[in-house]
Structures are given as structure tokens and as C-alpha cells.
Image (cartoon, grey):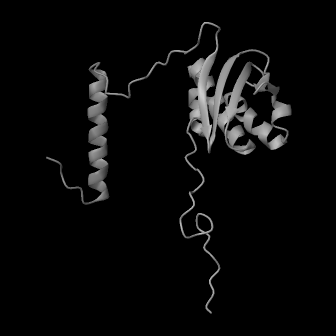
Amino acid sequence: MAQDIKSLDQLKEAVSANAGAAAAVADAGVSAPAQPQVLREPQRDELGRAYATGKRKDAVARVWVKPGSGKVVVNGKDMAEYFARPVLQMILRQPFDIAGVAGQYDVYATVAGGGLSGQAGAVKHGISKALQLHEPGLRPALKAAGFLTRDPRVVERKKYGRRKARRSFQFSKR
């Protein structure tokens, strides 16, 4: 049964007693139950590519990643040609910079739906997932940056009796 701890001195004693018990268990050669390490295997096809699907808003991107010189092709066009704005190009480069593998992988992506910003986010999500499938050691950095999580924010639907999702008609008192 657990004891009631009512002072800081009692808390200190309880902590030191627990530490002593843990040291005794360690000396006996019995290991404390630790988090099981999940060893992930690289998932590559016969051509050495890793495939992943990325999503953002209404955009869906199919992404293939393989070792190479850092060339990024989106819908048959070079990244700089398809995503003309520098901000969108920076979004695509983020997973490589975070993982520390800039210029080491070629990317081939097809993306459909949404606008350019959503498509850039979808390709970024796909690149991140494909990188961690190709090289599982990159997963902790990408996970910590939040690149493996699909952004759930989407456009709110229009409601009946309103002009937009939340915008109402102009009120007229008379």
C-alpha cells in the first residue's frame, strides 16, 4: 500500500529509497523495463527508390526519393520552374536541410489538387515520409521538426443561409 507523504523530508527519503532499490536491481544484473527499441528496415523498391504519399489541404503528392545529386522534378518540370516563388522552393528544401542530407537525394513527384501553396506542403510531407522510409536514421530529426505529421487544417465548408463559411448577409434593421 502506498504511504502518504506530507513533508519534503518524507519525499526525499522516499526518492532515495527508490533510487537505492533501483541500484540494487541493477547490481543484481536484472535490467529495468525500458522502452523497446523499434528497429526500422529501409523500404525501397528494386530501383533503390522509396515511395511516400504527402497531403496538405486538398493537394495530394506521390513522391519517389532515391540517392542522387539533389535534382527535384515536380510534374515533369524542374522545381524552380514549377514552384516559381522562392518561399515554395524553400518549403521543399526544408526536409533535406533538417535531416542534413541536402544535395544527396533526387526527388520525382507528381502532385494534384489544391493550389501551389498546398501542393508545396504536400510535396514536403511526401519527401519527409519517403526520406525516413529510405533511411530510417533520419526519422528522429524529421519527427522532431514535425514534418512527418499531416497538417489537418482544411477549408471550412460553406453553411446554408450564409454567404461563406462564417460570413453572414449584411443585417438591415429596416
Q: Is residue 48 above or below residue 104?
A: above
- Identified at 79% across, 37% down, the residue is 89
Total label count? Answer: 0
Q: Considering depth in this image, is 1 or 81 the residue closer to the camera?
A: 81
169 left or right of 35 in image? right
Q: Considering depth in this image, is 77 or 159 the residue closer to the camera?
A: 159
128 left or right of 70 in image? left
- Quadrant occupied by the C terminus: bottom right
Quarter holding residue 7: bottom left
Q: Is residue 109 visible?
A: yes
Give coordinates of residue 158: x percent, y percent: 57, 61
- Identified at 75% across, 19% down, the residue is 104
Give coordinates of residue 24: x percent, y percent: 27, 27
- Identified at 60% across, 21% down, the residue is 51
Q: Considering depth in this image, is 70 or 142 the residue closer to the camera?
A: 70
Q: Considering depth in this image, is 121 or 154 the residue closer to the camera?
A: 154
Q: Residue furthest top?
A: 46
Q: In this view, does 62 lie above or below 18?
A: above
Give coordinates of residue 163: x percent, y percent: 62, 68
Q: Which residue lies furthest to the left in this view?
A: 1
Q: Is residue 129 visible?
A: no
Quarter holding residue 124: top right
Give coordinates of residue 141: x percent, y percent: 61, 32
Q: Which residue lies furthest to the bottom in this view?
A: 174
- Identified at 29% across, 35% down, the residue is 20
